[in-house]
Image (spheres, helix red, strand yellow):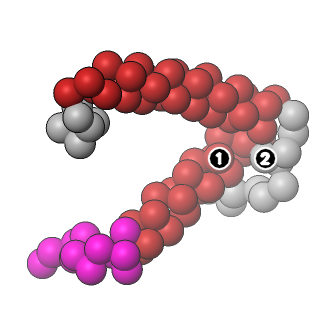
Amino acid sequence: MSLTLEVHETSIGMGLFNLISFISGTVGTAVVAKLIDGGFMNLYENPLLNTAKAVPYSNLLLIFACVVIISGVIYNRIFGKKVFTS
């Protein structure tokens, strides 16, 4: 951030960046807590689990894994770089 802005805009840009980071962290935590507590994540029963209390966490992990995979595909399509090299 500090290298992309001009010298007189650096402090404003860094402050805004930190503000957005703090707000998105708290909003993200609140959304995850509401999803787990609200019963929205009990839709899919994972056959590998041996307790029903772990179902919301398993479903949330599957959603986050899908988000990471989709983000990787989008990054690869936009920037044309190989994410996985062999």
* Residue 27 counted in the magenta span: no
Residue 30 in sight in this render: yes
* Mark 2, residue position: 41
Residue that protrudes farthest toward the left in the picture: 86
Mark 2 belongs to which amino acid?
Met
Give the magenta part as a residue range.
Answer: 75-86
**Badge 2: residue crowd in 10 Å (few <14, some 14–19, many ≥20):** some
Q: Residue at x 37, y 29 (%)?
A: 13
Residue 20 placement (x, y as % from top left): 52, 29
Mark 1 belongs to which amino acid?
Leu
* Residue 83 counted in the magenta span: yes
**Badge 1: residue crowd in 10 Å (few <14, some 14–19, many ≥20):** some
61 versus 72 height, above or below: above
In the picture, the quarter occupied by the C terminus is: bottom left
* Mark 1, residue position: 60
| Image quadrant in which you'd find residue 74 | bottom left
Camera-side residue of 11 and 48: 11
Residue that protrudes farthest toward the front in the picture: 8
Measured Cα–Cα span from mark 2 to mark 1: 7 Å
Labelled pair 2, 1 in contact (Cβ < 8 Å): yes
The tag earlier along the polypeptide, 2 or 1, is 2
40 versus 44 height, above or below: above
Q: Residue at x 45, y 64 (%)?
A: 71
Residue 27 placement (x, y as % from top left): 66, 29
In the picture, the quarter occupied by the N terminus is: top left
